[in-house]
Image: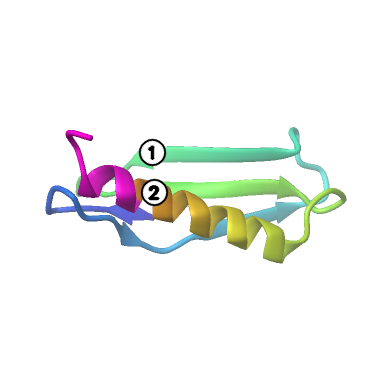
Amino acid sequence: EVGGGLPGRVDGETFLHARQGAKTDLTLCVRREADGAWTGVFEYATALFERGTVERLASHFHALLEAATGKPTA
């Protein structure tokens, strides 16, 4: 979940959804909640990815969002 009441700030938690019958290898679904927060869910094929790998990917993605919102004019 990537929320944010303040510009330049990314808050949240990572949600992972492991599936043996995933339709694609790796999917990131992002949606805006009623309260204005953004929620992101990584869905991945367990035959191709270990949970730790997807957790690292999610962590890097979160860091990218933090960097992007920290310097909006860069």
Q: Where does the N terminus fall, quadrant-wise?
A: bottom left
Give the left or right position of residue 54, taking residue 66 as reference. Answer: right
- Snapshot quadrant of residue 24: top right
Q: What SS does tag 2 mark?
A: strand
Disc 1 crowd rating (10 Å Cα; few below 14, some 14-19, many 20+) is: few
* CA gap, disc 1 and disc 2: 5 Å
Give the left or right position of residue 19, taking residue 8 as reference. Answer: right
Q: Identify the amino acid type marked 1.
A: Arg
Give the left or right position of residue 55, taking residue 45 as reference. Answer: left
Q: Residue at x 23, y 35 (%)?
A: 74
Q: What SS does tag 1 mark?
A: strand
Residue 29 lies, with reference to residue 61, above or below; the image says above
- Report if the CB atoms under discs 1 and 2 are less than 8 Å apart: yes
Q: Is residue 37 visible?
A: yes
The residues colored magenta run 66-74
> Which dot marks residue 69?
none
Residue 68 lies, with reference to residue 17, above or below; the image says above
- Snapshot quadrant of residue 55: bottom right
Q: To which residue does mark 1 refer?
A: 31
Q: To which residue does mark 2 refer?
A: 39
Give the left or right position of residue 22, taking residue 70 as reference. Answer: right
Q: Identify the amino acid type marked 2.
A: Thr
Q: Earlier in the sequence, mark 1 or mark 2?
A: 1
Q: Residue at x 71, y 55 (%)?
A: 18
Q: Is residue 69 magenta?
A: yes
